[in-house]
């Protein structure tokens, strides 16, 4: 699995990185800064996050976990030397996979990662079987089939607009990353920090302007997402 580590103590970080390698998993990034960590997690999309609770002496790890949960479904495993009931109860409110006490034992981390991997698999299976979603609009729920979605975009952090084949524009309360995780992984890809598209609906890719056309709509292609898009292009 791809693991991101949030840890501000160098010695603890080194031990965790060694254990991750010994358990044949991959650390895709790490940081002790909550703001940097959130940005990297949203970009790197790890399978699980190992989260230290006390960053710079504060309970920033729990606050960071809450922000992660708003935008992704990434499983959280807490690592902390704090075993007070109050802190554990607060951490439990974010529905973590596990709460490991420092120094983290190899077997404890191995068990927690097995649980996290099972959750990732179950989430992916549930997502892959999804063929429709219901969007709340005032006092009714509108059914939208997944195949009818052309793309989605956001102008704010917490709301997205979904555009369908029949030119409906429906607003949902979710981040663009959270919406992408709800939709099938293979069919929808992110092309820009503000856009996800239904890859099966792409009509034209413009290399000069680095943009994509879908049913007359122009979608930007961001530098960060360029490589992933090019991998899907079968050029003759």
Image (cartoon, rainbow, N blue to C red):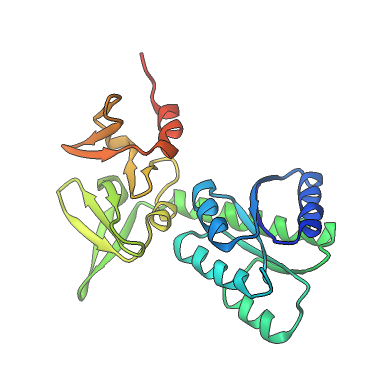
Quadrant housing residue 172: bottom left
In the rendered image, residue 226, in percent from the top left (x then y), is placed at 41, 33
Count of numbered circles on the image: 0
Up-down relation of residue 163 to residue 171 (above or below): above
In the rendered image, residue 17, in percent from the top left (x then y), is placed at 76, 50
In the rendered image, residue 71, in percent from the top left (x then y), is placed at 45, 61
Q: Residue at x 30, y 55 (%)?
A: 154
In this orientation, which residue lies closer to the viewer: 161 or 156? 156
Pick the quarter of the image with the C terminus: top left
Q: Residue furthest top?
A: 236
Up-down relation of residue 133 to residue 87 (above or below): above
In this orientation, which residue lies closer to the viewer: 104 or 13? 13
Q: Residue furthest front?
A: 56
Q: Residue furthest bottom?
A: 86
On screen, residue 216 versus residue 11, left or right, reads left
Q: Residue at x 44, y 51 (%)?
A: 129
Up-down relation of residue 94 to residue 161 (above or below): below
On screen, residue 202 versus residue 217, left or right, reads right
Quadrant housing residue 221: top left
Up-down relation of residue 56 to residue 1 (above or below): below
In the rendered image, residue 103, in percent from the top left (x then y), is placed at 83, 65
Q: Which residue is drawn at 40% across and 36% down?
A: 223
């Amino acid at each position: 699995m791809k693991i991101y580590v949030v840890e501000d103590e160098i010695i603890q970080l080194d031990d965790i990185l060694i254990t991750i390698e010994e358990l044949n998993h991959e650390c895709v990034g790490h940081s002790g800064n909550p703001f940097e960590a959130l940005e990297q997690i949203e970009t790197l999309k790890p399978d699980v996050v190992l989260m230290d609770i006390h960053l710079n002496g504060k309970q920033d790890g729990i606050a960071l976990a809450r922000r992660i949960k708003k935008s992704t479904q990434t499983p959280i495993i807490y690592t902390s030397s704090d075993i007070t009931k109050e802190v554990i109860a607060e951490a439990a409110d974010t529905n973590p996979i596990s709460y490991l006490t420092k120094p983290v034992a190899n077997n404890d981390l191995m068990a927690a990662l097995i649980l996290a991997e099972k959750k990732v698999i179950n989430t992916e299976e549930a997502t892959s079987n999804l063929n429709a979603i219901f969007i709340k609009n005032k006092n009714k729920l509108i059914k939208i089939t997944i195949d009818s979605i052309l793309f989605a975009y956001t102008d704010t952090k917490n709301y997205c607009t979904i555009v369908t084949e029949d030119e409906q524009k429906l607003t949902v309360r979710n981040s663009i990353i959270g919406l992408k995780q709800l939709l099938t992984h293979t069919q929808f890809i992110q092309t820009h920090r503000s856009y996800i598209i239904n890859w099966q609906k792409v009509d034209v890719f413009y290399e000069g302007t680095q943009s994509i056309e879908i049913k007359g709509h122009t979608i930007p292609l961001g530098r960060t997402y360029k490589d992933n898009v090019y991998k899907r292009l079968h050029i003759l």
